[in-house]
Image (spheres, rainbow, N blue to C red):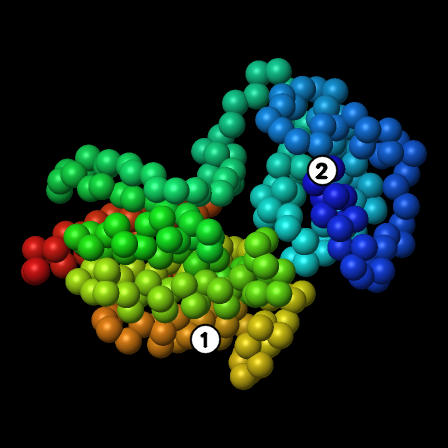
Amino acid sequence: MKTILTEHAKRCEKDTTFALSVPLVDDAKAALDAVPMYGPFIVDHKMAQDIGVLWSDPAIKRVYETRSKLQIPDMCAYFFDKVDIVGEEDFLPSNEDIIRCTFRTTGIREIELELPVGLFKVVDVGGQRSERSKWIHCFELCSAVIFFGAISEYDQVLREDNTVNRLEETLKLFEEISNSRWFRDCTMILFLNKIDLFREKLKTAPFKSFAPDYEGGECFDAACRYLKGEFESRCTMKSVYTNFTSVIDGTSVKQLFGNLTDLVLRMHLEK
């Protein structure tokens, strides 16, 4: 919660139009002092109450509405809305709670999945600029590349460079990877992710501000078709298997993963 106001304060130093028109109420000011700046920490009943007071304050809500211009994670509202439940002594996170928790991937992480059709080794890598040099040369013998692109970030900027649009950076990275000699013989699978957030954001943030040649207005299907074409046109060496996903929809992701497992196995056998 303090991070929201800290990020907001940084922006106010550069742009006075971000100043709050609604000051924090006294109860929220007291709660702000009680909430730790950095974690990890335990959200007990008292802290949950403090966070709830802050989240109900109009000034905090106004800051959150500008989150696309700040570095505020998408999942904040989900957990703030249920903070009273999180603060209960016997709280156990649900599958959806766990799925909505995100963290920055650094370096290279390997996971082995034993499936009925065989053993799959999944290698998770960091997509940030500072991470790419650590892994781009390590996958000459891999069977498939699964590339995730968060299409809801079309109105956001990079944390490491606030002059660069996140989705434009994702397009450039996809172009670099899909045409790289290291992945020449790999099946290229594209997940255009966070469609749930994308659908909602189209109602308030014009997609045309990202893509001046786009003429589909707020139409979700039109915007998806546009992005599918943009990504696939960047890959000039092979076909791309494109899927629109929301990782919080466990049922559809499970079904999709099963289909992709069959695809990867078939493509590997053909080689």
At horizontal 92% and vertical 34% (from top left) the residue drawn is 26
Mark 1 residue type: Tyr
Query: How many numbered discs sit on the rendered protein?
Result: 2
Q: Position of residue 95 (x, y in %)?
A: 45, 33
The picture quadrant where one finds residue 3 is: top right
Q: Which class describes the residues within 10 Å of circle 2: few (<14), some (14-19), or many (20+)?
A: many
Of residues 212 and 225, the one nearer the viewer is: 212
Please tell me whether mark 2 sits on a helix, a strand or a loop: loop
Residue at image point 59% right, 59% down = 161
**Quadrant of image for the N terminus:** top right
Q: Position of residue 209 (x, y in %)?
A: 62, 74
Q: Is residue 96 visible?
A: no
Towards the viewer: 83 or 156: 156
Q: In the drawing, what numbered circle is on residue 56? A: none
Q: CA distance from mark 1 to mark 2?
A: 36 Å
Q: Is residue 56 above or below residue 87?
A: below
Residue 162: x, y in percent? Answer: 62, 60
- Taking the image as shown, residue 268 lies to the left or right of residue 144, namely left
Residue 231: quadrant of the picture: bottom left
Instruction: Name the amino acid, label 2.
Output: Met
Q: Which residue is mark 2?
A: 1
Name the quarter where the C terminus is drawn: bottom left
User: Can residue 171 be seen at all in this image of the molecule?
Assistant: yes
For the point 63% across and 71% down, which residue is it?
Answer: 206
Q: Earlier in the sequence, mark 1 or mark 2?
A: 2
Secondary structure at numbered mark 1: helix
Looking at the image, residue 156 sits to the left or right of residue 49; the answer is left
Above or below for 50 versus 74: above
Q: Which mark is residue 226?
A: 1
